[in-house]
Amino acid sequence: MSPKSPGDDFKFKNITISGLPGSGSTTLLNKLKKHEALKFAGWTGFSGGEFMRAYAKEKGLFVEQNGLHHDASHYEDDFDRKVDFGMREKLSNESGWIIESWLSGFMAQNIEGTLKVLMICSDKAVKVDRIVNRDVVTPGEAIKNMQERYVNNLTKWKRVYANEWNEWVVKTGKAKASDPIDFWRPNLYDVIIDTYSANQQKTLQIVIDAITK
């Protein structure tokens, strides 16, 4: 008998969590990592954003200011693709992973057995408040950082992943060729959680319910 893997007792073998800043994606990751049933089964998780930031600091690619997070333009295209396709490889060949990053759900497209969670927050003021508290900045700084990161990241990733968008999304009928590239398009995900109306415990329970047999 072959040894059991972390995903054997669940409907899905891996989980991705995607969401724009202030949506609560990192909070959900941390809650899932501490969940007793998942810990007992051997699940583990990591934040792609934290990994990238640690790399950028180590290589001196940017100077951190006021604790605000930087955008993807600080990395070379090849490094972005190496990290992102490393996630896709884990999701394809391993189990028990909880991976949180802006693009983790997109990188999981068409991979069987991965629950793709999209985190949103329908109230902009709440999103801003979360970033203000997390990064200890003013609301104006938080809004400016959110907007700049979104525009810069989307601009870069639309260029870097145009071929994958066509292969994984357009050719599989999830979007038309004429549709704009949107990595957080709702129909690319299995579960969508609005953290304005769902608190942390309810958010956690939604995901646990989705993966429990």
Image (cartoon, helix red, strand yellow):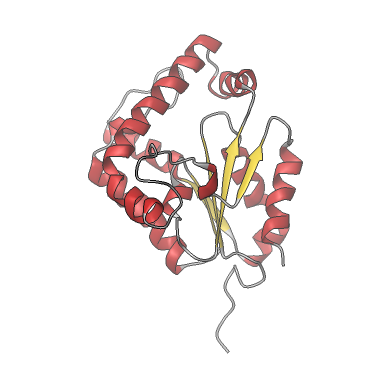
In this rendering, is residue 57 above or below 136?
A: below
Q: What residue is shown at x 49% (from left), y 41% (from top)?
A: 185
In this rendering, is residue 129 above or below 15?
A: above
Please state which of residues 109 and 202 is positioned toward the viewer in this rendering.
109
Q: What residue is shown at x 55% (from left), y 49% (from top)?
A: 189
In this rendering, is residue 13 above or below 167?
A: below
Please count the marks in the image.
0
Q: Residue furthest bottom?
A: 1
Where is residue 141? Give x, y as percent.
Answer: 48, 13
Please state which of residues 150 and 110 is positioned toward the viewer in this rendering.
110
Q: Relative to residue 26, is residue 155 drawn left or right?
A: left
* Quadrant the C terminus occupies: bottom right
Q: Relative to residue 162, is residue 150 drawn left or right?
A: right
In this rendering, is residue 159 above or below 64?
A: below
Where is residue 125? Give x, y as percent.
Answer: 62, 17
| Visible residue check, residue 98 | yes
Q: Residue 37 is drawn in which quadrant?
A: bottom right
Where is residue 65? Give x, y as percent.
Answer: 40, 18
Q: Residue 200 is drawn in which quadrant?
A: top right
| Visible residue check, residue 138 | no
Please state which of residues 179 and 51 is positioned toward the viewer in this rendering.
179
Q: What residue is shown at x 28% (from left), y 50% (from top)?
A: 163
Q: What residue is shown at x 57% (from left), y 73% (from top)?
A: 5
Please state which of residues 137 and 195 is positioned toward the viewer in this rendering.
195
* Quadrant the N terminus occupies: bottom right
Where is residue 110? Give x, y as percent.
Answer: 45, 60
